[in-house]
Amino acid sequence: MQLFEGYSAEELGRILATSRWFFGVLIILAAVAGFFTQWLVGQIVAREREDRAKALQRLAAAELELRTSDAKMKDMGTTLGRLTQARRLNDAQLAKLRTLLSAGPRGPVVVLFLVTEWDAAIYARQIASLLVEAGFDAKVSEYVLATLDHDGLFLCTGADGKLSAHASSIKSAFSAVGVPVEAHEALTLAKESGAPPEAAVMIVGNRK
């Protein structure tokens, strides 16, 4: 080639060595670039997978939070409905209670209610009316009951810690229709209310 005319063999050898060195460097750089490109692609894929996994985790957490919120809202709705709906015995319960109570021992009953519970007075009057229909000498006390140590519907036990025969009959009858009636010692309350010693004292307290 005319380009290399005038060069000696030694000079051409140096040019060849330089060319080989230059192309060797290019090959090394190309290899490094290839490895770097593969590493970079791997990093991008790994990051995309990581981001996708995090996104799925966030989505799952959001769905769980939504389900939890829905459950809480339903629970709040149920609780609100329970608290805003007056306690009452339904017709089927009333019919069965009349039969059960009429078949057992009867006696005087004084029904007290917690004045701070909005539906307690209505419930107490319904219970007293039912007891009268079943043959009990029952009445709602005018005693102002502002606080109680127990919630729900309960009967006061006597000095011996037991219920009288007709009080036990009331407890069993109510339990038979799905209305739990507990028994608690409340002698002081029974005396303060003016209930006669032979009377069964039934108390309508807070909702459970």
Image (spheres, grey):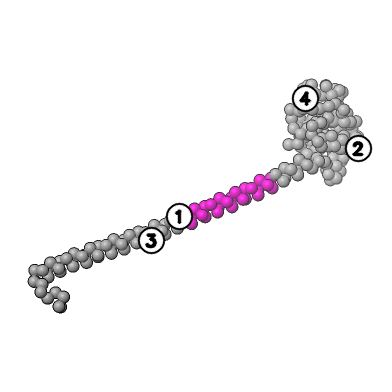
Task: Work out whether mark 3 precedes mark 1 in sequence or the reverse, and give the earlier one.
Answer: 3
Quadrant location of residue 191? top right
Q: Which amino acid type corresponds to the residue marked 2 in the rendered image?
A: Glu
Q: Nearer the viewer, mark 2 or mark 3?
A: 3
Task: Work out whether mark 1 precedes mark 4 in sequence or the reverse, and give the earlier one.
Answer: 1
Q: Label 3 to label 1, Cα distance in Å?
A: 14 Å
Quadrant location of residue 178? top right
Q: Position of residue 61 (x, y in %)?
A: 56, 50
Q: Which amino acid type corresponds to the residue marked 3 in the rendered image?
A: Val
Q: Residues within 10 Å of mark 3 (few under 14, many from 20)?
A: few
Q: Residue at x 83, y 22 (%)?
A: 192
Residue at the spot of label 2:
133
Q: Residues within 10 Å of mark 4 (few under 14, many from 20)?
A: some
Residue at the spot of label 3:
41
Q: Which amino acid type corresponds to the residue marked 1 in the rendered image?
A: Glu
Asked if one can make out residue 8 in the rendered structure from this viewpoint, the answer is yes
Q: Which disc, if any, is residue 186?
A: 4
Task: Work out whether mark 1 precedes mark 2 in sequence or the reverse, and give the earlier one.
Answer: 1
Q: Label 3 to label 4, Cα distance in Å?
A: 80 Å
Of 22 and 79, nearer the camera is 22
Task: Work out whether mark 4 precedes mark 2 in sequence or the reverse, and give the earlier one.
Answer: 2
Are the residues flagged by discs 4 and 2 in contact, CB closer than 8 Å? no
Q: Residues within 10 Å of mark 1 (few under 14, many from 20)?
A: few
Q: What segment carries the magenta color?
A: 52-75
Q: Is residue 63 magenta?
A: yes
